[in-house]
Image (cartoon, helix red, strand yellow):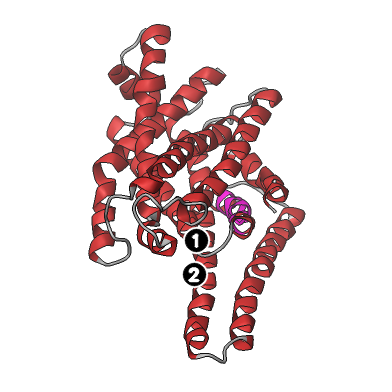
Amino acid sequence: MHEERRFPVWLQFACVAGYFGTDLFLRFSYQAVLGADVNTHSEYSDEDYVIERYSKPAFMVLCGYILFFFWGPLLVWPYLKFVKKVSVVNYYQTTWCGDLEFREALRYTCIMGCILFLGNLGYVAGLRYINVPLASALSQGEAPFTVALSVLFLHRVFGKNEKIGTGLSFTGIVLIAVPPVLRAEQAAQYYGNGDDVAASAPADVLDQFGGILSTLIGAFGFGCYQVFWPMFDGCRYSAANPAPTNPIDAIIDTFATLSLVGAFLLSTGWVALVLFHLFGWETFEVPPESIRGALLFSTILMAIVDALNGIACVIASAMVVALSYPLIIPCQW
């Protein structure tokens, strides 16, 4: 495995802070599309109907990641053509691949695309049933997941204190996740005299449980994603063929990878939407005009946020990103 790169502290801080700020903004944007402040007067009078019918987590996530493809023509191609004076094909087949064959490196980007899609799908789907502060607190599970996966796959060595901290993190997730489910069940028992309320009580509890479980699956997915970056670099680069140490080259390398992830999802992601439609998990239909603007904003913001996450993992490290991520929780309550 190649020696880990070291970048200036100010650059690491800027990358991590930029990721945190846009991620916080994205979380509230998600919930605006999924159920809050939706103007439905243009097409439908029943807002609940529109929210239920057009809350499409898989569609939202896929649209956001398809936009990854455009990082190539917008950033990578101009930089290679006018600064490096090399062709895109030559760059991908030599510099970007490192010690790997192009097809082998391409397989890694396909795996990364699947991890990202499933991870963000879990988080966005969870926001249909739980609020932003609770979802954000639960999503901090990516920190202990990242630590555990780093030990397992990156062979990071952690002492007794780190192990205790990881265990306490998982305990904290349980303490955060259980009370909302219990409150929903208690409320159902307290108000459960009417037939309508009694019928809706189990659904409320299941919604809370499903939202919490979905968010935790998303946290695990993002933990995998953050660990995948150094794993991919470890396969591509070595002492004889080191990773780029110039910050601009490292950032362009990240965007080049994400562009291929976008190309993979652009060509295959629609299959997932068709399968979801056939199995009845998510109806595939065009969103109403009333929420297209908010949906477009969220998908563009998603592409920016996860690109910044990749850059932060490369410039700072996956561990720094994961362990400092809980700092945004106070901003959401």
Residue 14, given in percent of the width and then of the height, sits at: 65, 28
Q: Are marks 2 and 1 in contact (CB under 8 Å)?
A: yes
Residue 325, given in percent of the width and then of the height, sits at: 65, 45
Q: Which residue is mark 2?
A: 210
Question: Where, quadrant-wise, is the C terminus in this rendering?
Answer: bottom right
Q: Tell me which residue sits at (65%, 24%) in the image.
A: 11
In-front residue for pair 272/332: 332
Q: Give the main secondary structure of the magenta stretch.
A: helix
Looking at the image, tell me whether mark 2 or mark 1 is earlier in sequence order: 1
Left or right, 177 with reference to 241: right
Q: Which residue is mark 1?
A: 126
Q: Which mark is residue 140?
A: none
Q: Is residue 187 magenta?
A: no
Residue 220, given in percent of the width and then of the height, sits at: 52, 56
For the record, the magenta segment spans 138-150
Structural crowding at the residue carrying mark 2, measured as other residues with C-alpha within 10 Å and reported as few (<14), some (14–19) or many (≥20): some
Residue 6, given in percent of the width and then of the height, sits at: 63, 26
Is residue 40 something that shows in the picture?
yes
Secondary structure of the residue carrying numbered label 1: helix
Structural crowding at the residue carrying mark 1, measured as other residues with C-alpha within 10 Å and reported as few (<14), some (14–19) or many (≥20): many
